[in-house]
Image (cartoon, rainbow, N blue to C red):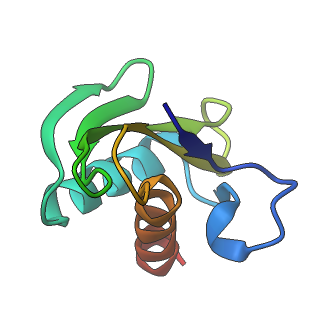
Amino acid sequence: MSGFSTQDSHSGRWHQPVSVPIHSGDAFQAACELVEDLGGWTDIQVDPKAMVLTCKGPGGLLGKPASIRIWTEGREGMPASTTHCSSEGGGGLLSKDKANVTEFIRKFYMRVT
C-alpha cells in the first residue's frame, strides 16, 4: 500500500497543512462542505467532536478507492487552526494519493483564504 500525507517539511504549497486565522470548528466545517462538493469522494463519515472526516476517494489505475482522512487542529476559543489531509491507496497502478491530497488542499486553501 502507498500513502501520502500533508507535512510542513514538504516543499510544495499544496502538500503542506493549511494554517489559517479561523476558529478550528469553522475550518473543519469548511472542510466538510468541500468534501461534499468534490466529485468521486464517497462514504463520508464525520466525527465533529474529534474534528476528523474520513471518506473514500479516487484510487490508482486498477486499484481500490483510496482511504482519505482529513482532520483539523486548533485550540478552543482561539482563531487559529491547521487542517491536514492524508490519502492511503488501495493498490493498483499509478497511485492517486498525492493527487488526492493536492486536490483537497488546493481547493480548501482557496475556500478559507
Q: Quadrant of the C terminus?
A: bottom right
> What residue is shown at x 43% (from left), y 54% (from top)?
95
- Judging depth in this view, the residue of 109 and 25 nearest the camera is 109
The answer to whether 63 is drawn above or below residue 53 in the figure is below
> What residue is shown at x 66% (from left), y 63% (from top)?
15
The answer to whether 73 is drawn above or below residue 29 in the figure is above
The answer to whether 12 is drawn above or below residue 105 in the figure is below
Q: Is residue 55 left or right of residue 21?
A: left
The reply to whether residue 20 is in sight is: no
Q: Is residue 48 left or right of residue 97?
A: left
- Judging depth in this view, the residue of 1 and 67 nearest the camera is 1
Q: Is residue 98 left or right of residue 28?
A: right
| Residue 109 image point, x, y percent | 52, 73
The reply to whether residue 94 is in sight is: yes
- Judging depth in this view, the residue of 103 and 2 nearest the camera is 2
- Judging depth in this view, the residue of 66 and 21 nearest the camera is 66
Q: Quadrant of residue 50?
A: top left
| Residue 23 image point, x, y percent | 55, 48
> What residue is shown at x 36% (from left), y 53% (from top)?
31
| Residue 74 image point, x, y percent | 65, 36
> What residue is shown at x 42% (from left), y 60% (from top)?
94
Q: Quadrant of residue 44?
A: top left
